[in-house]
Image (cartoon, helix red, strand yellow):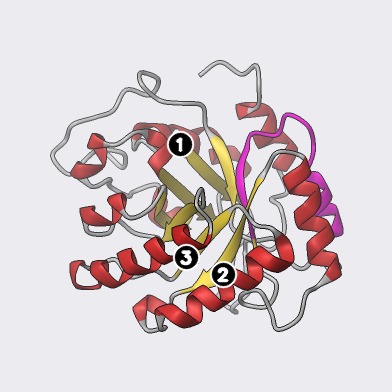
Amino acid sequence: MSHLTSTGRRRSATAGVSRLGFGVPGCAHPLVAPAEWAELTRPETPLHWAVLNVARGPGVLPDPHCLEAAGRLTNAGVRVLGHLDLRFGTRPVGELISEAHRFLDWYKVGGFYLDRCPADRAALPETRRTTAALRAALEDAYVVLGQGTHPYQGYAEAADQLVTFSGPWAGYRWSQVAEWTAEYAPQRFCHLVHGVPRTHLEEAMRIARWQGAGTIYFTDRTDRGGGDDPWEALPGYWDDIVSRIGPGVSE
């Protein structure tokens, strides 16, 4: 089955699982997607965090539109994460920290989303150095590592949350979870899945719970093989999925 651990052990779909919530990996610029940014501030939306990606990072100058959008989310109690591209471990730590400071100074973010984070054991020490420097810049920074696959287990100690799946529904529905993840609480893991049909939402949420992910983002949008970003707009069934896991919904 798709939602088994590598040894065949299963997680209960309810026991020990905290309420599911959303992690939004980055809507388009607020001028392009104003409705999306406004929707994220809707009261009682179970939103764990949202990524602010101004221009593949913080940009070179403060953007008043992004400042306004980030401020509204922060005021609504949503954690805003600045987007840092690790390029699979090829960027110098100093360069990343410089970008982090711009996010902090200009947009008052509450943490960071480290996109294209390496997943292998050899790159772990440098990643730990980066996350330690980020926490030095912001003491209570919430740090998400965006590997998009199950990394070496040591990465779980370097961040608040790991994105252990990022990809299409065709891959997700047959995915397997690494055995070591059973040692951690669901809030330590996030799944980002595009191309999920509305008719398969329940199945997708069942897989997420079974595999122990506390944060999700499912969308019916796809990259269509042309480099389109499926995360830039909210899914067509946003209201539906919010109603399925919002406050008052029994797990």
Label 3 Cα neighbours within 10 Å, binned few <14 / some 14-19 / many ≥20: many
Label 1 sits on a secondary structure element that is loop
Q: Nearer the viewer, residue 249 or 161?
A: 161
Counting residues from the N terminus, which is met first, the one under dot 2 or under dot 1? 2
Position of residue 178 relative to residue 186, above or below, is below
Q: In the current view of this chain or complex, which residue is farthest to the left? A: 7
Counting residues from the N terminus, which is met first, the one under dot 3 or under dot 1? 3
Image quarter of the N terminus: top left
Q: Mark 1 — residue?
A: 214
Q: Mark 2 — residue?
A: 100
Residue 159 position within the rendered picture, expressed as x and y whole percent measured from the top left: 38, 53
Magenta stretch encompasses residue 46 = yes
Nearest to the eye among marks 2 and 3: give it: 2
Label 2 sits on a secondary structure element that is helix
Q: Amino acid at mark 1?
A: Gly
Residue 250 position within the rendered picture, expressed as x and y whole percent measured from the top left: 56, 15
The quadrant where residue 242 appears: top right
Q: Amino acid at mark 3?
A: Leu
Position of residue 5 relative to residue 151, above or below, is above
Position of residue 91 relative to residue 151, above or below, is below
Q: What is the C-alpha distance between the residues marked 3 and 1?
A: 18 Å
Magenta stretch: give its range.
33-51
At horizontal 51% and vertical 48% (from top left) the residue drawn is 140
Q: Mark 3 — residue?
A: 114
Q: Are marks 2 and 1 in contact (CB under 8 Å)?
A: no
